[in-house]
Amino acid sequence: MLFGVRGERSRFPFGQTDGGKSRSPRLPFVLVVFLTLVSSFGVAYVLATLISPPVLSPLPVSVVGISDAPARARRVPLTTPEFDAESFCRTIIENNLFRPLGWTPPRPKEPYRLIGTLLPRSAHTPPKAILQSTTGEKTYIVSVGEKIDAATEVISIESKAVTLSREGQSRTLRLRIGF
């Protein structure tokens, strides 16, 4: 059996009577004291962990004399190794953090495109090739041994193919015919 606010019999805890009129609920004194103690212990625990770090037991230390240490451990390099800033920056640029996973760099674009080849019918005329810059601004008619620009030279001209040398590397341009 429960008692209401003024000693009346009630089926409802915290001050509600049978008449349906609700009164302001009051917590029992024991509950208030309990919540106060729990909150104060919680605050004390948080402050204790923030102020004093946990103390760990020290590891056992063994003292080794200089004569006991191996000779190779006593060697100290006289100079520090050189830091190669250029290769460090190159690594960062090549492996960009913001690129998607599995990204591969695009294939280098050829500076010239083969338009056609002119093969001689007689031994007195040299073979010729018609090349166009990939920007589409210039067209070149060249033969073997001629330079297209300062770094590019024509090495050989064959049927539907031209071999160019650029900075010591040779590249073969092929005529793509698809009707």
Image: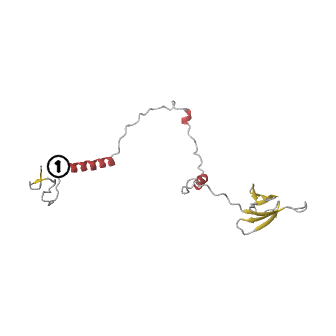
Left or right of 105: which side holds 164?
Answer: right
Residue at 64% from the left image edge and 58% from the top image edge: 106
Q: Considering the numbered disc 1 on the image, is that residue within a helix, a strand or a loop?
A: helix
Kindly indicate the quadrant of the structure image that contains residue 114: bottom right
Task: Compare residues 7 and 136 and report the one nearer the observer.
Answer: 7
Task: Compare residues 10 and 58 and report the one nearer the observer.
Answer: 10
Pinpoint residue 9: horizontal percent, then vertical percent.
Answer: 10, 53
Q: Is residue 33 above or below residue 71?
A: below
Left or right of 100: which side holds 22?
Answer: left
Q: Is residue 128 above or below residue 4?
A: below
Q: Residue furthest bottom?
A: 137
Pinpoint residue 1: horizontal percent, then vertical percent.
Answer: 12, 49
Residue topped by disc 1: 30
Instruction: Name the image quarter holding the C terminus.
Output: bottom right
Q: Is residue 79 above or below residue 146?
A: above
Left or right of 54: which side holds 106?
Answer: right
Pinpoint residue 88: horizontal percent, then vertical percent.
Answer: 58, 52
Q: Is residue 70 above or below residue 32?
A: above
Residue at 19% from the left image edge and 50% from the top image edge: 31
